[in-house]
Image: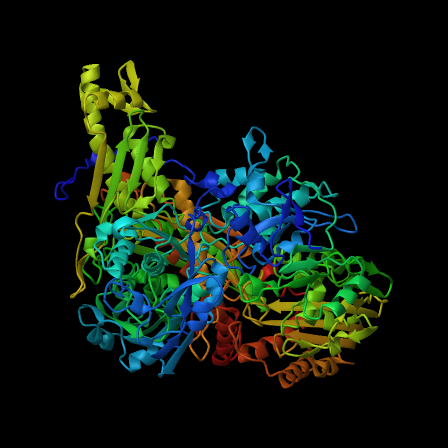
Amino acid sequence: MTEPIRFSLNGCAVEARCRADMTVLEWLRLEALLRGTKEGCAEGDCGACSVLLKRPDPRGRSAFQAANSCIMLMGQLDGASLVTVEGLAAMRTGAQSGHPVQLAMEENGSSQCGFCTPGIVSALAGLLDRQSGSEDADHTLAEDDIHDALAGNLCRCTGYRPIVEAACAAASQQIAPLPDHPVGSPNAVTGEDSSQMLHPATLDELLALLRQHTDATLLAGGTDISLDVAHARARWERVISTRNVTELRNISENADVLTLGAAVTWQEALPFVAEHWPSFATLIRRFGSTQIRSMGTVAGNLATSSPIGDGAPALLALGASLRLASSQDERTLPLDDFFLDYRKNALRPGEIIKAIHIPLTGSELDERRHAAFRVYKLSKRYDQDISTVCGAFSLAFEGDRVAGARIAFGGMAATPMRCTAAADALLGKPLDGATISAAKAAIAGTFKPMSDMRGSAAYRAMAAANLVDRLAHDLSGETVEVMAL
Amino acid sequence: MNIQSKPPVAAQKLDAETRIVGHDHVHDSASRHVRGQAVYIDDMPDLPGTLHCAPVLSNVAHGKILNIDFDKARASEGVVDVLLASDIPGKNEVAPIFADEPFLAEGKVEHVGQIVGLVVADTLAHALQAARKVVVDIEELTPCFDEAEAFEAQSRTLPDQHLKRGDAQQAIEAAARRLTGRVKMGGQDHFYLEAHTAHAFPGEAGDMTVWSSTQHPTEVQVHVAMLLGVKSHKVDVKCRRMGGAFGGKESQATIIAGLAALAAHATGQPCRFRMRRDDDMAATGKRHGYTINYDVGFDETGRIHGLKVEALAHSGHVADLTGPVIARTLTHLDNCYHIEHADFLGFAAKTNTVSNTAFRGFGGPQGMVAIEAIIDDIARSLGRDAQDIRAANYYGAETGSETPYGQSVFVGDELAHDNPLRNVIERVTSNARWDEKRTQIEAFNAKRGVLRKGLAMMPVKFGISFNLTTLNQGGALVHVYMDGSVHLNHGGTEMGQGLNTKVAQVVAEVFGIPLGDVQITPSDTGKVPNTSATAASSGSDLNGMAAFNAASEIKARMLDVACEHFDAMPSDIDFRDGQVVCGDRSISFGTLAKYCWMKRISLSAEGFYATPKIHWDGKTMKGRPFFYFTYGAAVAEVVIDTLTGENRCLSVDIVQDCGKSLNPVIDLGQIEGAFVQGMGWLTCEELWWDEKGRLRTVGPSTYKIPGSRDVPPVFNVELLENRPNPEETVYRSKAVGEPPLMLSIAVWLALRDAVSSLSGHRLAAALDAPATPERVLFAVEDMKERAGELI
């Protein structure tokens, strides 16, 4: 039985009877006639379509997050709460109508053409909602927090200064809760018969559905594959969502390993990663945008098997492994063995990623032994860009000598790949000029990168090798990144 | 109608103390922008039967069309029609100047992304799906993608332009020093957030109403009429606002609007045509990339004696606006410097890429990048600071004050007492604490770390007016209603720049009424006809003055009635704060309007304005093309990573001359926005084509415009104070739309400075634009190779 899609829209319970693969943006503009939300790019990169989404969370940490409605499917709204710019405009702030961000932006000359504005309002309202709901009440908003929140929103007119200022001004105000009318957990099958979304609640259910519907589309965050729908290249009759599968939402940690369930989003993983690998956390903050990270999953990033996939080089260097599951069996595969070729991986038909295991190695093992992890992303723009080259280095030292090394790169081959030759060149040696040269030569010998719009083969080769130099300078305490100034 | 030879504007009115003009007013739509209530064309409600269009694009750069098979597309779900060039009832012609560009390809294709056909369907998704099913059979011909290659082959889209003064060749040969060089710069996508959109409504008897996201409603009107084979009076074109334009909707919007009208004509139903982002970026023009070759002769002080330049503009497959773009390049190659012997050649390279078009600055930025690169190269070759070379060449009493095209730079006593160029430069170097910064940067670089810093100053002189004198006209229509509220319409268009707000301020100022009593209405060819594009930074100069004239005319009539009412002289009566005041008596503005109506006095007027004093001979490239110049200067500090080429602007100081600003907060927004946009052009924004001529940067995932974190953390902007425009512009203001974009060249120059620092500033950086991490790293490597021992 296909049920309508139930969700809260601007504080009202709604039942939508529509294709599950219709984009939320299309539904808002064509069905709900809420045309404040705009289409700028239909690829989740400009943020004009940003809305606020709150989805049920097993750990009870549910919060509104900005998300891109252009690549979000109606089926994903099941059981969720959605707030659009119109919903924010209906809020009251003192005697005025509108969210404090809207009022501050209006007063501060923060809009020119105004087309990006509703998306920017949504992104900032999301930031302030999290801020006001934060347990750490003393935490004041830093400019960097605002840039993090705006990384997924492009403005071509203003130069951003008046927008950032408006965010600061609004942050100092009392902010009412966003309009919400929780509708309960989703039904098992929603949408309409020609396009439905299945919401299994357990891993067994999910695997059984996959066996039953071999032609179904498996959807985690959809920040990659839903572009096909947004561009009208694909229509899906049946989509199986991983989102509500309890086992896949788990994040657990013991002395040896951090485990991320396959439905864990980047945003959810971030605080756990930050605890152990600050450099990885910095990379995650540059991964897509708040909008993308609130939907996109770590496992999905691996499963798409892009040659770049920013998560992959870091996880390869950290020695991560994958727990894979099908209705027949489960197995563990080192991430090293997962990527087979351009956008090809070792998943068998009916098999999914269940969890990602990242081994924990303390950074200070003892006085003589210590470990270091660094991941460096090179791109044309700092925020929300795809790497030209991404290099990850996980080193263990005994005294000044390298006692263990795992090095991996993205953007240098058809898949993200380790460079064992470079790691071998470092082993047993101090990070001096000769060692660095040997490691650089090993990188040059390992990779034959390609030229594309992100960079030429020559640039990729040179910059990747130079990251070894950067590593050495970085570990010596020198400031090595322009953003640090 | 006002007669242009007898300016109706009394100078003292423009100089009077103002209550609304000159003060901060936020954008008229700000309250609706932030609430999602500002209606863009795609937000307009659908009438029943509304259809949607999707384009069929060429995937071949150059070839003969052998066959177009659209049977599958026609049979596709929801499809109503598939339109080709043969379906056009009138002329298949969309070029703004020359007749060289079809709406729909006919017989041949000349770039990947050229529009070959149009699918019309019940939904956008159906139209897009069907468009992919059209099979275009093309016999491929040899393409050309590079402007230098086209120059070699002498393949051009329009005749060369040549700006000459004196004998450059002789001066160069006679000079003590000589340098030759070449600088290349990429194009730029406009990346307006609202992609091209039009909505066409067929009417009765062949009428057509087109809502178009256009900077140029009249051009849309003219071309839609030609396309449909009717006269202009059958077509009405409207636009309330655009979601950004930046020049990208000057001529290009006509393509989209025309095709929407064609679909509406063919089906008899309302038709929407909204380009998807990737189609928009593939099918519509961008800023011109340039290759500029130079040969310069100078002396030991760095004073330029003669300069020869070949400016090769990447025109694309047809001319579009490349002619006037080149004219602006050639007339801005001098920037702020007096060049006695000049020989500037402009060449429009025909390439098999989308035809490039207007973009904020309109060729000016490319000319300025070239001259600043030349200054930089001269400085390094002499081992001097570029600031010294600039100082040796600035327009002034010791050098000269006439541009190579024969216009005097300074007005009145500017040269003797109040040199605006010197003012902005002195102010900005002082604000930026130039010397202190230079010392700090030298100390930072002396640590010989991975990161190196650079510093540069960029002065800008920009000519205001369209080069082509004819275009410098504006119109407005003003009605005063019986309750004293005012309906305002003018010939300009609103793209976010705040033009409507400024023009409404002018009208409110004239009538002495609150700004909220002036209703802004959509641009409409049925209200103000025969308009020029809202372009060349001229929107408020032209339309503001036209509205001033219209309102002044109505006010004069109302004043007569007021004199009668109060039994007083005109000089005794003041219009202010919504009141008409005479001594201690007053009536409301609305009451006076009612009295006028009762006395059968017209409360409606059209206003017209033609910029005085200007003239231009396009053949000899001489005259006074610009009513006035605006000035600005910027100091930028940057840091580069010598291992990866990553770079960042750390601080910028700007001083911009806005005359007596009509609205400082809006002008500030223009300055900041233009600077960041220009910085994007010169750093992170890169157009990248593959070997087949396919643009592969057709969305924000691959084409990277600046984000909020890219804005310099220190960003100080100052409007030059107490500088009313010496010319009689509207309330003595100056144009602001384009000039500050060129201030961003400071960032590119500072990056060159950072690279050059590796040689102790002995060698010039081999750095083209955009200065992506890749180009910066290669420039660093090149510097290491040439400099030997690094500093």
Q: Quick check: can you spot residue B703?
A: yes
Which quarter shows the N terminus of chain B? top left
A108, above or below B297, in the image: above
- The x, y position of residue B388, in whole percent, is 36, 62
Residues A256 and B317: in front is B317
- Residue at x-position 72% and y-position 81%: A420
- The x, y position of residue A331, in whole percent, is 82, 74
Q: Quick check: can you spot residue B62?
A: no
- Residue at x-position 53% and y-position 71%: A454
As drawn, the residue found furthest toward the bottom would be A445
* Left or right: B654 as drawn, with respect to A406: left
* Left or right: B413 as drawn, with respect to A410: left
**Residue B665 location, quadrant:** top left
- The x, y position of residue B55, in whole percent, is 41, 65
Way the structure is coloured: rainbow
**Residue A203 location, quadrant:** bottom right
What is the count of numbered marks?
0
* Left or right: B207 as drawn, with respect to B497: left
- The x, y position of residue A272, in whole percent, is 76, 58
* Left or right: B757 as drawn, with respect to A335: left
Residues A414 and A184: in front is A184
Residues A207 and A300: in front is A207
**Residue A140 location, quadrant:** top right
Residues B70 and A142: in front is B70
